[in-house]
Image (tube, helix red, strand yellow):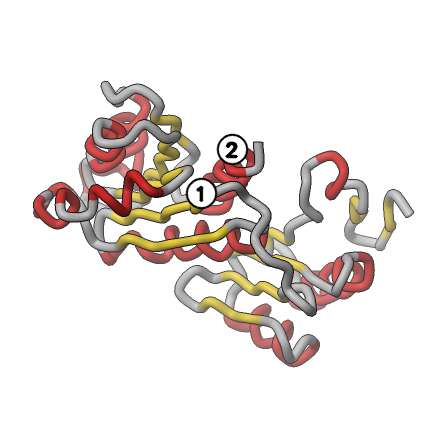
Amino acid sequence: MKFERLPFATIDHLRPITQGHQEVIFCPGKTVGQVVAIAERLEAAGGGGSFLATRADAAQAQALVDRFPRVEINELGRTAYLPPDPEPAPTGRGTVLICTAGTSDLAVAEEAAVSARALKNRVERLTDVGVAGIHRLLTQTDVLRAASVIIVVAGMEGALPSVVGGLVKVPVIAVPTSVGYGASFGGLAALLAMLNSCASGVTVVNIDNGFGAAAAASRINHS
């Protein structure tokens, strides 16, 4: 079956072939019933029964728990992940490291971490190592250099990806967050700073886009 048509969605079962993973449910704008119905179709179609939903609100998450008792809810990252049973070992060639500038960036970082795991990567976290106390980062150079891909999540002035990019030879994916005071313009200041990074090898995804960073990191880690 290539496509499955519902009154409100056309589910694409070719995604594992075209994208390397099944379709992911983006929950905002969908009703609780729509989210559950899509999850049911993905769970039935996937080997071992699996799905990933991002940006789930409390009602959507609870409905998924009620329908799928095995589902793992990450309240901070607003994800709902039903792992395959049994869950296979990661297939990426190395580790995807999620590095956060501050605790306030953790919601986006957790979305990236859960998504990277769902995309069959080994994931590690390095939290609260922003440039306001850069010595915290400089004690972790061995961890940084052991990773295959690094996702750097930062708000405010968005300087951390440039610093990390100057310390490692692996790809760095920068995620600007909407964390900051008024002149951060909801993450625009961090986005522009990251786009203008003087460290080579740094690429940038959209504001608060933890899933997008994980998808890019997974492709690199599986290449």
For residue 94, above or below residue 34? above
**Residue tagged by mark 2?**
220
Camera-nearest label, 2 or 1 = 2
**86 sits to left or right of 182:** right
Toward the viewer: 36 or 8? 36
Q: Secondary structure at mark 2?
A: helix
Question: Which residue is drawn at the image coordinates 20% and 47% (left, top)?
Answer: 140
On the image, the x and y values in percent for residue 28 come to: 56, 54
Which residue is drawn at the image coordinates 84% and 54% (left, top)? 7
* Quadrant that contains the C terminus: top right
Residue drawn 36% across the image and 48% down it: 98
From this view, report whether residue 178 is shown above or below residue 165.
below
In terms of sequence position, does the residue under pointer 2 or pointer 1 come before the other? 1
Q: Amino acid at mark 1?
A: Asn
The residue pinned by badge 1 equals: 209
Given residues 221 and 55, the one toward you in this image is 221
* Crowdedness near tag 1: few (<14), some (14–19) or many (≥20) residues, C-alpha within 10 Å: some
